[in-house]
Amino acid sequence: MTLRLRKTLWMSFFCLLVFSIAIPVLTPSLNTTGSKDYRMASSAVERELVINNDIRAMRESKNSRSLPTPITNYTIDVFLQELSHIVNGLTTINYVNHVGIGLKELYFHLYPNAFKPDAYLTVWQVEYQGAPLAFTMEGTGQRLLRVDLLAGPGELTPENNVTLTIMWEVMVPESKDRFGWFHRLTPFEFLAYNMGNWHPIVCVYDDRGWHTAPYTFMGESFYSDVATYDVSLNVPDEYIVAATGEILDVSSGSGRRVWHFTTGPVRDFTWCASPDYDTSSILVEGVNVTSYFVADHTTGGLRTLEVAQECLEIFGSLFGPYAWSSLRIVEADFWAGGMEYPQLVMIGQSLYDNPEEISNLAAVTAHEIGHEWIPFSIGTDSYTEPWIDEGFASFCEYVWVEYVYGQSARADYRLRDLEYYWNFVTGNGDVSINQSMLFWESEPFRYYPFVYIKASLVYDMLRYQLGNATFYQAWQYIYDHALHQNIRASTLQQLFEAALGESLDWFFDQWVFGSGVVTLSLSNGSYQQSMLGWLVSFDLHQIESEPIALWVPITISTSMGNESFWVWMSSDPITSHTLLVTQEPLTLMLDPKQSLLCRYLTSSIPLTVIPGIPIPYAIAGGVGIAMVLGVGILIWRRRRK
C-alpha cells in the first residue's frame, strides 16, 4: 500500500469518526436529567437496596451526638392498690432548663383527667426543699398542673435546674384502652393494667411557648422532651411487669413485689402488669426483645418476636440503630390495633388469633416498632403534626414487607393503600396532611385516610423521587442530627435538604403543605430512527390543577422488552421530552407502577413513526461523505505543496 493511499484511508477514517460524533449533535436533544446519580434509573435491580452489612456494622455503634448535660430526671415510687384500682405516686423531678429563657412556672400534663368521671389524677401536694409550693390544676377537666416557681425557688434561669416533689394518686378506669384495667373471663382469664400516659409529665417549652395540647382519644396528643427515669413499681406478688427501660431489681415481701426500672434518654415511662402473662425473649443485635402474651396465644406471641427481629435489623440498617437495649411487645385486650410507647408497644389481643405471615398481627407489630424511630428516637408533636410519625410508621410497614417478602409483595401491599386513598378522595376531596388534631377531630372521617394512608404514600413517593440509596442515606443523616431532639415538618424538610445538598420545595410544597389532585396526561408520541438507536418524543401535560415540578417515571415498550426512564416535569402546563431507546419502540407508558400520587387522564399511548433515512443508507451515505472529504483534503494538501 502506497503512502498516499494510506494517508487517504486514514483521513477518510478520521472524517467518518467526526461524522459519527456529529450525528447526535444534529439530532434532537435527549432528556438525560433522570440519570443524576441519586435518581433511580431504569434498572429494577437499582430499586432493591440490599441491607449492607458494612453499613449496618458502622451504624450499630450508638449515636455520638451528645445531649445537653444534665437532662431532666424523674424518680417515681408507685403503689398499685389492685382492689380499688388506685395508684399512689410520689414523683421527684429534677427539671433542667435548656429552653434559653428564664421560666416563672412549670406546666405538667395530667392526662388521666381526660377519662373523668371514670378516672382521675389528683395532685395532693407539690414541695420544694421540703416546703409546700403553690400550684393549680387548670384547663378543661383539670388536665394541666401549673407550678408557680416564683413562690419558691424563683425564676429558673437558663441551664439551671430545680428539684420538685409531687404527691399524687390516679384512679385507673375499667377500660380496654391504652390507659385502663380490664378483666376478661372467657374464653380465658386475663387481668391486666395498661398504664400509658398515667403520671404527671412536664410539658414541652419551645419558641412557641408551653405546649399544653389536650388529650385526644382519636389519635395522639403526646409531646415531650427526653428525660431519664428511675421508677419503682409496687404490685401484687403474682404480677409480671413490662415497662420502659431496664430492670434493675425485683424484690419480694409481704405478698408484693417491687419492680425497679431505670432508663436512658426516653420521652415517657410506660408499664403494663398482669398475673396472666407468659413471656419469651430473644437477643437481636444487642437488643433484648421480650414478648408478653397469654398462654392461649403462644403462637401469636412468638410471631411478634419474629417480626420484631426482622424490624430491628431492617429499620436499624436503613434509618439508624435502635437507640436502646430492650424492647417489649405486650398483648393488650383493648379496642385499638396497637399503641406505641418508648421501648414498649401494645398489640391488640384480637390480632393474636391470626399469626400468619402478612397478617394484621404482623403488620401492626411492624408499624408500632417503626414508631420507636419516630416519635421516640426523633421527637415530634403528635398533636400539631401527627402525620410525621403515623405516616412514617405506616411507611415502615411497606419497608418490612419489602425486605422480608420481596418487591412484589410490597407492591401489592402498597397498592391496597393507594386504592383506598383514591376511593376516598374521589368522594371527599383532598386536603393537606400537615394538619393538627384540632382539624382531624373536626373531620374525623378524614383522619385515617390522610394521617396514615396518604402520609405513608407521600413518604414512599419521596423514596421513589430520590432513589433508595439516597433516601435511606438521608434518613441516617437525619438520625445523626436529630436523635433525641424534637423536629417539625419544616425541620424534616431542612434535614433532608442538608443531606441532599439541594432544595426540596418542589416536593414538600405540594405533597406535605399543599393539597389537590395532580392529573397528568400524555400526547404527541412519536419516534424516528437515528444512528444511535430510536428517538422517542412526547409531551407531558398537567391539567386540572396548578402545575408542579416532579420526577415522572416513563416506560417505553419495545420489540425486545421494556426500557424505563425518569423525566423531569417542570412547573409548566406542558413539558416536551425526547428519550433514546436501543430497540424499536411500540408504546409509551406513564408511571406503570403507580409510584406517584397522581391521576392519569391518558397513561399509555401508541407511538407514531416519523419517516427518516434508513440506517443502512445513512451509514453508506456517511461513509461516502467521509471518503469525498478525505480525497478533497488530500488534493488540497498536494496543491499547497
Image: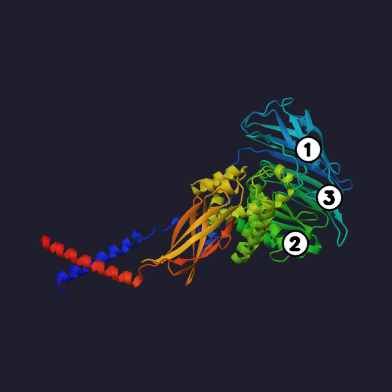
- Answer with left or right where residue 503 lies relative to residue 335: left
Q: Position of residue 411 (x, y in %)?
A: 61, 63
Q: Inspect this view and state whether residue 63 appears.
A: no
Crowd tier of the residue under label 2, counting other residues whose Cα lies within 10 Å: few below 14, some 14–19, many 20 or above: many
Where does label 1 land, which residue?
Answer: 143
Question: What residue is shown at x 64% (from left), y 58% (from top)?
Answer: 418
The front one of 192 and 386 is 386
The front one of 399 and 556 is 556
> Callout 1, which amino acid?
Arg
Marks 2/3: CA distance?
Answer: 23 Å
Question: What residue is shown at x 63% (from left), y 65% (from top)?
Answer: 409
**Between disc 3 and disc 1, whose residue precedes?**
1
Q: Nearer the viewer, mark 2 or mark 3?
A: 3
**Between disc 1 and disc 2, whose residue precedes?**
1
> Callout 3, which amino acid?
Ser
- Circle 3 — which element? loop
Marks 1/2: CA distance?
Answer: 36 Å
- Answer with left or right where residue 570 lies relative to residue 489: left
Where does label 2 land, which residue?
Answer: 301
Quarter occupied by the N terminus:
bottom left
Question: What residue is shown at x 72% (from left), y 66% (from top)?
Answer: 356
Crowd tier of the residue under label 1, counting other residues whose Cα lies within 10 Å: few below 14, some 14–19, many 20 or above: many
As drawn, the label of residue 375 is none
Q: Nearer the viewer, mark 1 or mark 2?
A: 1
Residue at the left extreme of this rendering? 641
Above or below, comparing residue 107 to residue 293 in the picture: above
Where does label 3 land, which residue?
Answer: 175
The image quadrant of residue 122 is top right
> Callout 2, which amino acid?
Gly
